Amino acid sequence: AQSVTQLDSQVPVFEEAPVELRCNYSSSVSVYLFWYVQYPNQGLQLLLKYLSGSTLVKGINGFEAEFNKSQTSFHLRKPSVHISDTAEYFCAVRRGDSSYKLIFGSGTRLLVRP
Amino acid sequence: KAGVTQTPRYLIKTRGQQVTLSCSPISGHRSVSWYQQTPGQGLQFLFEYFSETQRNKGNFPGRFSGRQFSNSRSEMNVSTLELGDSALYLCASSPSRPSGEYNEQFFGPGTRLTVL
């Protein structure tokens, strides 16, 4: 079985500061990794995904994430955040090519302050 | 292309009633998945459909059911509603089978169900 842990339930940060949202996963098989963002009263939007290849993945809105197999981590980073980045961020894993089923972490609320 | 649409967006029901939620995937997409989002349990997988066949099912009681039609539109039904069923129900669509480049799901805005 797979599981995802997002250790930080909330991360406050000042505008234009860098941020890292942490994600660790557990799986006995290879997985695909995803970060989604959810704005209030909206669905989920894909920020980036790791399927294979380069461990540094770049996504939309200036976000990037690095896959670390030895540490089973997939942390999300942004060098300079904006007020508009305030949202809930979810890390998710998917097992291989047999299903679209996503296992989500509990989410991290990013709160950007002016 | 239009995105994933879910109807209705908001719904209020009382305990014991049943409810049907609808999801229209992106045109050409054949796979539809459903998720339940609650403050306590987070995002949990309900079911996955591909070409009218349920391919995968989450750990939910039998009161939760779903189906997919030949035009890929999907519905989920919850019978005998309980207070704990209050949640945001999200639908996601995908182009084809989950392999190769077809690895992304596109989420709809969700249906907010409140059970009183």
Image: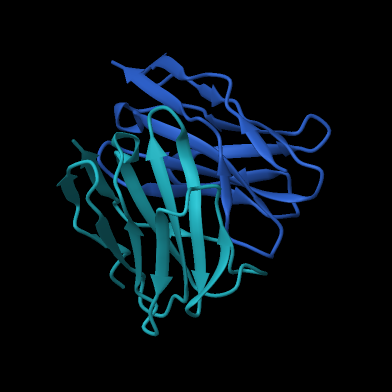
* Residue that appears at 46% across and 54% down: B62
* Residue that appears at 40% across and 85% down: B70
Quadrant holding the C terminus of chain A: top left
Q: Where residue B38 sits in the image (x, y, percent)?
A: 38, 35
Q: Nearer the viewer, residue B26 or B101?
A: B26
Answer above or below: position of B18 versus A2: below
Q: Is residue B116 left or right of residue A108?
A: left
Answer above or below: position of B3 versus B111: below
Figure chain in blue: A
Q: Where residue B109 sits in the image (x, y, percent)?
A: 29, 52
Q: Where residue B40 sits in the image (x, y, percent)?
A: 42, 27
Question: In this figure, what is the number of numbered marks?
Answer: 0
Figure chain in cyan: B
Q: Is residue B104 left or right of residue A45?
A: right
Q: Where residue B16 sits in the image (x, y, percent)?
A: 24, 46
* Residue that appears at 31% across and 38% down: A39
Q: Nearer the viewer, residue B78 or B39?
A: B78
* Residue that appears at 22% across and 50% down: B17
